[in-house]
Image (cartoon, rainbow, N blue to C red):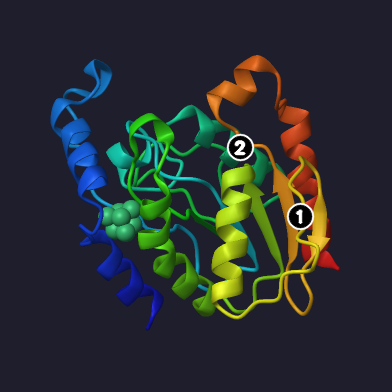
């Protein structure tokens, strides 16, 4: 399956009744600040070129971010932090991501998620993770030359490792533990770098500062150059 075919199938997916209802409710009701916009309200595909060497795995689209704009981490505060960090190491051509058509391009980087529809309270259920997993497994097969993976948060870490194993990747035993800044070379595979998620909950409380987040991308850039 090509990346185009995968993304085309993904955006038509209605496999999770709770998430379909939620994403469409949000799209119909809208936030007051965006009332004149047409929300995407569908599954949000991964973003970035097929020759990517860096894969970034988030959690799920934000209700008024990706679910509004149709692009990963676009139009929300998490995206402001993420794209600024990518731009600082030359992996994005601009530091902001406001809407499709804003001219943003990623260099050698793909951003995806284990769940492609916005969930209530940003919390997909275990069965929703399971139902969406084949998309990530397929994406991992298509991006066979990935050298570095950054997982954003413990949930993304667990979801990535499960999908990675399912696609035939080897996960060390004992299984690595998540921690901000932890890096693991997966046997015969990419280097896995763990980061806290750049959510407002983490950035507003100081659990994740901009320098802490930038360190992750500096580490990734160095690993890509090795
Ligand atoms: S979360 Fe994934 S499996 Fe569920 S409806 Fe959205 S795209 Fe389909």
> Where does the image place residue 75, in percent across and percent down from the top left?
40, 33
Q: Residue at x 78, y 30 (%)?
A: 211
Q: Quadrant of residue 138?
A: bottom left
Q: From the top left corner, tell me how far across and down residue 27 is, in percent.
A: 19, 35
Evaluate whether residue 108 shows in this view: no
The residue lying at 39 percent from left, 45 percent from top is 125
Identify residue for label 1. 220
* Residue 51: assigned label: none
State the residue position of label 2: 197
Quadrant into which the N terminus falls: bottom left
| Residue 159 horizontal/vertical position (percent) | 55, 56
Ligand 1 picture quarter:
bottom left
Q: Write the residue at 23% across / 61% down.
A: 13
Indicate left or right for 43 with 142 as reference.
left
Q: Which residue appears farthest toward the bottom when viewing the image? A: 1
Instruction: Residue lying at the far right in this picture: please name it.
Output: 226
Q: Is residue 13 visible?
A: yes
């Amino acid at each position: 399956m090509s990346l185009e075919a995968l993304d085309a199938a993904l955006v038509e997916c209605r496999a999770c009744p709770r998430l379909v209802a939620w994403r469409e409710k949000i799209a119909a009701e809208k936030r007051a600040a965006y009332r004149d916009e047409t929300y995407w309200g569908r599954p949000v595909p991964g973003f970035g070129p097929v020759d990517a060497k860096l894969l970034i795995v988030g959690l799920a689209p934000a209700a008024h971010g990706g679910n509004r704009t149709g692009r990963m981490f676009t139009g929300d505060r998490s995206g402001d932090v993420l794209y600024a960090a990518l731009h600082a190491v030359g992996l994005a051509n601009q530091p902001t991501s406001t809407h499709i058509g804003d001219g943003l391009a990623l260099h050698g980087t793909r951003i995806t998620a284990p769940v492609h529809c916005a969930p209530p309270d940003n919390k997909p259920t275990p069965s929703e993770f399971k139902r969406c997993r084949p998309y990530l497994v397929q994406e991992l097969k298509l991006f066979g030359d990935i050298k570095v993976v950054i997982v954003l948060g413990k949930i993304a870490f667990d979801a990535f490792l499960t999908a990675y194993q399912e696609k035939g990747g080897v996960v060390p035993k004992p299984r690595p533990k998540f921690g901000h800044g932890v890096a693991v070379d997966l046997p015969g595979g990419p280097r896995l770098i763990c980061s806290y998620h750049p959510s407002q909950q983490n950035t507003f409380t100081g659990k994740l500062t901009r320098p802490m987040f930038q360190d992750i991308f500096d580490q990734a850039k160095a690993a890509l150059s090795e």
